[in-house]
Amino acid sequence: MSDQVIIFDTTLRDGEQALAASLSVREKLQIALALERLGVDVMEAGFPVSSPGDFKSVRTIAEHVKGSVICGLARAVEKDIDACGESLSVAERFRIHTFISTSTVHVESKLRRSFEDVLNMGVNAVKHARKYTDDVEFSCEDAGRTPIDNLCRMVEAAIDAGATTVNIPDTVGYTIPSEFGGIITDLFNRVPNIDKAVISVHCHNDLGLAVANSIAAVQAGARQIECTINGIGERAGNCSLEEVAMILNTRKDITKVSTGINTQEIYKTSRLVSQLCNMPVQSNKAIVGANAFSHSSGIHQDGVLKNKNTYEIITPQSIGKSETSLNMTSRSGRHVIKHRMSELGYSDKDYDLDNLYESFLVLADRKGQVFDYDLEALLYFNQQQKDEQHYKLLHLNAISGTPKTATAGVLLQVGDQEIEQAANGNGPVDASYRAILNAANIPVEIVDYKLGTKTGGEDAQGHANIIATYKGKRYHGFGLSTDIVDASAKALLHVLNLTYRADQVEEKKQAKQQGE
């Protein structure tokens, strides 16, 4: 049996479907390229049949990512599999991942079929997928609650039909490690053709056991783990990629296996996913949390000063986290910024130095000093701004103060037009939003607004995140500035430009349909 564990990342599929607002194609590609640098073996890029946007995202990722196998998800339905085959056809290497429920409660209550029908559907799906590729994965949804006899039959039939990977998901996070490991052991003991496929596991975290169950499965013979960055995903989330990668890397003495993950890319990738997905990482999160390498107890501090290994089993550097607190000013040159970005783990291809330096100078003039975390925040914001902006904020003036009502005036560029509007509100942000929406004349409804900082100190950069609805869909916008009103306005402009691009895609789709 191989001592290499395949890391199958599903951040862009299982992780993304749990977000309050969908990611744009550019944002998905950003994450995909980061995952490629991280060294994931297989990247589940999306569910192509679910929407034109998801189809485009999968195809875009398939065109650009070369270092990982690109995978698309499909129900055990021919149209789903065809959508996968079409969207992935441009990839150098791709996989079709098809699935069907196998537990009694799912078969009877959700599918309302007999198990024999379900087995035949699974077999036919695998055979259909093999028309597109030899790399076919089959999942027994809710395997953790499937009667073992039925599970063995399904796994054997899927392998006979041509599945080269068979996934055993704990879909609802119900099992405990000894139980889940036992299921994998039973499969190896009872399925006669199991040596012809890789056994994979996909564990959810409803009881906080996703990582533990995945490790137990590896010890029982599984050789693929399906996981997400920061453990994001449905309900309580998925198995955390950074945790399993560091467990297998740190405890090779016990597990006797390894992965191809470049662990020094972990921290940077975690930050990117947190930023773009608008999902903060809790401070005490293992591996990537803000407190993961912090020591408060005097006894602990004393031990770490004498020997870090007394209380640190892994180092910040092992996950690519810099301990440097070097600050920079407006007098710093481009070479300093380039050097710091290199020290933080970014290559020249990850950013445009001219754009980053221009933003850096503006921030340095406002703050005086700029730190590593400021540079990363600027990088994320600049990447978000790369798309063509239909709506541009040319000028904003907001006035606030008790007991007066807040007022705001804006000059907004909409395409080739410049529109000026003013509005009152119950605060400078509210007044600014009313003025911007009046100028844009778009029925956008803001359903969530959060303001925080991505940096530290009294002159920190304000980071605004909003979730807004437009034509029944949700959009996530974020803005960055030392001025919180400006940051909030940028977040709304981000949303408006996303809605504009969504309308453009829909218009092209309708025009194509009319032409046909």
Image (tube, grey):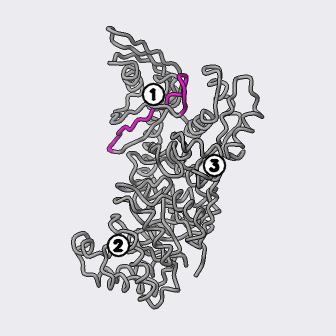
Residue furthest toward the top?
403
List x then y, in percent, for residue 87: 51, 63
Quickly name the residue at label 1.
488
Quickly name the residue at label 2.
144
Q: Residues within 10 Å of mark 2 (few under 14, many from 20)?
A: many
List x then y, in percent, for residue 104: 25, 76
Q: Is residue 387 above or below residue 329?
A: below
Q: Which residues are magenta?
A: 455-472
Amino acid type, mark 3: Lys
Q: Which mark is residue 308?
A: 3
Q: Quadrant of the C terminus?
A: bottom left
Name the residue at 40% across, 56% down: 237
Q: Nearer the viewer, residue 213 or 151?
A: 213
**SS type, badge 1:** helix
Left or right: where 353 falls relative to 237: right
Q: Earlier in the sequence, mark 2 or mark 1?
A: 2
Name the residue at 45% across, 37% down: 477
Amino acid type, mark 1: Ser
Q: Quadrant of the N terminus?
A: bottom right
List x then y, in percent, for residue 180: 39, 73
**Residue 267 appearing in the image:** yes
Q: Is residue 167 above or below residue 265?
A: below
Tell me the quarter of the picture where residue 398 sits: top left
Q: Is residue 279 magenta?
A: no
User: Marks 2 and 1: which is nearer the front?
Assistant: 2
Q: Which mark is residue 389?
A: none
